[in-house]
Image (spheres, helix red, strand yellow):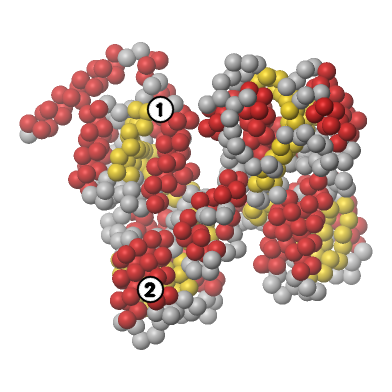
Amino acid sequence: MMKHIRLLLLLVIVALLALSMPAAAQDDITVLSSMPDLAFPFFVHMQAQIRDEAANLGVTLLETDGQSAVPKQTADVEAAIVQGVAAIVISPLDVAAMAPALQQAVDAGVPVVTVDRRVEGVSGILAHVGADNVLGGEAQAQWVISNYPDGARIFYLEGQPGAGPAIDRKAGFFSVIDAAGDAYPIVFEQTANFRRDEGLSVTEAGLAGLDAPPDVIVAANDDMALGALEAINAAGLGDSVKIIGFDALPEALESIMNGGMDGTVEQFPGQQGRLALQIAVEFARTGTAPENSLQLITPVVIDSNNLMEGERIGEVPGMEAAGEATGGAALLGDEIAACPGAAALTIYGSMPDLAFPFFVHMQLQGRDEAAAIGGVTYVETDGQSSVPKQTADVEAAIVQGAQALVISPLDVAAMAPALQQAVDAGLIVVTVDRRVEGVPGILNHVGADNVLGGEAQAQWVMSNYPDGARIFYLEGQPGSGPAIDRKAGFFSAIEAAGDAYTIVFEQTANFRRDEGLSVTEAGLAGLETPPDVIVAANDDMALGALEAINAAGLGDQVKIVGFDALPEALESIMNGGMDGTVEQFPGGQIRTALRVAVLQARGCDYSVANPVLLTPIVIDSANIDSAERIGEVSGG
């Protein structure tokens, strides 16, 4: 009783102190970030991402580790209340056992945002951010059915009893598997408490008790899956039993890459943690609550076909550069934050043609990044699909005394003389999206690896048409770097696949939708039978081609894959129009290019690859939430 009275008195004091602080002082806030057990790499990563976001938001972060003990995590919450934190972000160890402590926090006036693990029965929680673990479990089941269409003997390792993710993942998995019928029996089912050592020991014991090995082991997290992998390898079953986990840990991604594990489920813990903190801080500072208190991220299965989509792929040895780019986030954020901005800079941002939505988005991202950096005047120019116009823009930057030029050249060869002129005049030149060769002195290039993007399109075609396909190819603008590289990547992969994949039509449509329509109409008219798939070097041409095949009554017969992941293309995929596109993260490209230019102009220390090449990924209906611009799609 006395303990509760002391706590109540402390809460009153904290509340009175908060009311007495001026508004400016309340901007300097402290937020508790409480993880259930930092013995798990998943939560170490989540905590690190929250820490980075706290630095971005300018808040003090109080980090605690529940150490897999409800009393410890409860004490952490109570201590935070007493210390007067402005908000709590928590992934509860046990969703039921932690409910009283969270209700205590809410009653004390502390906003609470749960992350990853959702607590029911606590009135007043501000928001929950997490992956939809039920959908994640369903995705595991669908992966099993896809890999074993005739049925499979399933060995299931459950997570920690009472943990929300364990409950939801199991519910999702069994709902799909049970509906699939008797061809998918569960031959073993037991908890391994989310732990690798138990994943090993429980699997060893389970295998010993079976008359025949299972076809597949499904684990509710990657630690258990990696333990199970040790057990099946020790039993000599590595080539006969597939394993799928959940969490997309770097070690799991590396195992998939090296032929160990077969799959995992990505639930984007970094994105979860950052969003949870953003919600908490926004409410603490302004009193603004999110429109939707339940923020669920759709998980996706990661296997050898889409390994680059793993959020933590950059932590896999040898994949660091790929990981920097995969999420689409700009690089050098810490370096920019530490770089003093006393000297005002003028930077020209030159796009080749703002008639294309891709470049409109890129220019807007450049404008926003310049404003975020501060002390930068960003002069926006449009080449209007004219080399003389873009050349004149570059010459104007020189005359106006700009310090730097960030440019996506209309034609990489034709624009080289103007860029050499800029370099010779002392401007810092960073190319973006389209790389210019033969101009000594260009500081850096930031872009997507368009060759890999073209290869990804080809791999998508082969995955969707394993027995071969008749391919209709729409090229981009002749002379432009992306058109050259995307075609090179696509044809290198398709030609290596053999005669089953034939190019039945190939022509440029100059990256334009109207030409995509007219060229496709003409191409279809000249073919005796329709193609199986149309591959376009950008989304505008793909959308034009879609109009043509729909007008010809072929919408259900011919697949279309584009390139750029424009919002209209994403919406088309959602609505069953286009079938795929390639995401190359244009916002991440321009933001990184600007940061490189600013750091160089201000003489600040930084280190980055040259060139900086982001790894594109194919976006289709299975992973559409991974697209950089999905938020611009109505209903997305």
| Mark 2, secondary structure of its residue | helix
Q: Residue at the spot x=80%, y=29% of the render?
A: 423
Quarter holding the C terminus is: top right
Q: Residue at the spot x=61%, y=56% of the render?
A: 621
- How many residues crowd around disc 1 within 10 Å: few (fewer than 14), some, or many (20 or more)? some
Report the residue that reaches farthest toward the left.
2
Q: Residue at the spot x=80%, y=57% of the render?
A: 488
- How many residues crowd around disc 2 within 10 Å: few (fewer than 14), some, or many (20 or more)? many
Q: Amino acid at mark 2?
A: Ala
Q: Is residue 48 left or right of residue 108?
A: right
The location of residue 499, given as percent across then percent down, is 80, 74
Q: Is residue 196 left or right of residue 450?
A: left
Q: Residue at the spot x=44%, y=26% of the render?
A: 58
Residue 561 visible at all: no
81 versus 568 height, above or below: above
Q: Amino acid at mark 1?
A: Val
Q: Which mark is residue 59?
A: 1
Q: Give the residue number, with chain letter if any, for mark 2.
A: 231
